[in-house]
Image (cartoon, rainbow, N blue to C red):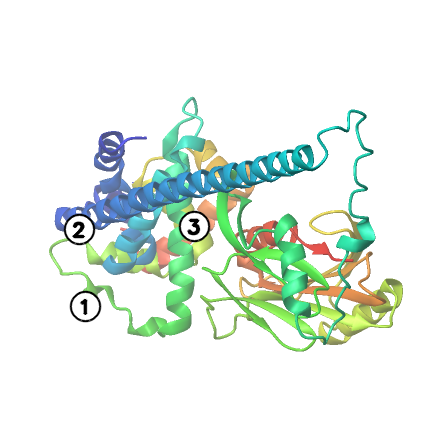
Amino acid sequence: MDRSQFQQLYTDFAPDLYRMALAITGRRELAKDALQETFLRVYRFSDQWDSSRPIRPWLYRILINECHRLLKKEKAQVPMETHHLETLVPSGEIRVDILDAVATLPEEYRVPLLLKYMENWKEREIAEALSLNLNTLKSRLTKARALMREAYGEG
Amino acid sequence: MEKWEQELKQFKTEHQQDLDEVWRSLDQEIVKEQRRKRRKQVMKRFTLAGAALIALLIGATLFLTMNGNDTEQAVETPEVTTPEPSPTPPSSNASEEEELTEGEPGYTEQELTKLNDSYPEEQEVPLEIEGMTEQIQMVRVVPGNFGYVFYADDERYEIAFDETTTSVKARDQIGGDYPEVGFQVEMIPDKKPTEVASEQAAQLEQRFPGATIEAEPVTEPVVGYKLHVREGDAPSSEVRTVYILDKQHEESTIVITQTVFLEAQEGHGARFHSMLKTFTVLD
């Protein structure tokens, strides 16, 4: 992959990936780090990527793994209660409430929920990307919806 | 549609500035990588050219020496027509130097020289992670007694030696409830692998009461016996794998104890696997 192809890939996917990283981590700095590391890996391994396969699930898989890694590292260093989205993300730029509610979900529910409702993925695609059985995914989504109702209200 | 669903669907970020910032960092990294690649290629070319030059010099020297001898012989004995029996080549005994033993001065250098032929100081080792194969530059790890050799990624892991143990620990430890990630290689003198395996299993039972200890003979990443135990199902649960190698080094049994936490099995686990695949017990 040459530089111009890589830049095109970044232009096409970075905004959505960044949004996803921000929704998973709840922090701009972590989201930026996750995005950067994801694209670095893509650049390094681009010659190994089978171009007949869709690139989007691969990008998301790398991003999600990276977000998890950064969150774990962060958790070990800084107590979670010090992370308040309101103070870290300027209000008005993004909808803080919904991300606060998402942040209350355990990670195993958070990612499937975001892929389905924010990224509009099909359940089969999510199950494949997360290496989950379709039934397991469905039950996680049911649980995630219930938790969101609790955290955000039925509306 | 519930309110949170609508909110999520409409969720947008306006962080073009952040995206630009990440792109700038990426661009710098790519330039650096390209430079590193170019430098590596140039170094490779230099090394090849150097080797070719040395081979040429050796060849030329040999050629000149042989020609010189022929000329001398021809001058000294011009009348001899029947070829003289060729001088006996120096016997192998003559060229054989006495082997130094451990503790003698020069032993380490002697062993390192022998090792260099088969195991260069650095080499690229394939690492399969997330379905992709990456070549990782790794360094040679050899303990002071030259009992074994393997390659380790010293960028991500810190390598340390003490009298009987070699440790490879992740530089990037999470800390807190998470166990320390790494593996250590220990040499246990005067015990057979079967004996050591029973002892190790007993130690695991004591350390992880109630947990199931899986035991099986393996051929990968090393040839020997594997004991595997998982502390629990939490992301931070310790997962320990012990390999007891079939091949001994001078009556010592080699034990490799690998520790990760459940969620790091894929990442660190894969890296350890690729390092341990290079493991060789030295004679």
> Which of pointers 3 and 1 indicates the residue nearer the eye?
3
Q: Residues within 10 Å of mark 3 (few under 14, many from 20)?
A: some
**Secondary structure at numbered mark 1:** helix
Q: Position of residue A56 (x, y in %)?
A: 36, 33
Read off the chain for label 3.
Answer: A
In-front residue for pair B82/B42: B82
Vertical arrangement, residue A60 with respect to residue B264, above or below: above
Q: Is residue A15 left or right of residue B132?
A: left
Query: Is there a contact, CB below 8 Å, between mark 3 and mark 2?
Result: no
| Residue A87 image label | 1
Residue identifier under label 2: B21
Q: In which quadrant of the rendered view does residue B258 lie?
A: bottom right
Read off the chain for label 1.
Answer: A
In-front residue for pair B32/A43: B32
Q: Residues within 10 Å of mark 1 (few under 14, many from 20)?
A: few
Q: Of marks 3 and 1, which one's residue comes earlier in the chain?
A: 3
Name which residue type carries label 1.
Thr
Q: In which quadrant of the rendered view does residue B172 lie?
A: bottom left
Q: Is residue B14 left or right of residue B211?
A: left
Are callouts 3 and 2 both on one chain? no
Name which residue type carries label 2.
Glu
Q: Position of residue A14 (x, y in %)?
A: 25, 41
| Mark-to-mark CA distance, 2 and 1 | 21 Å
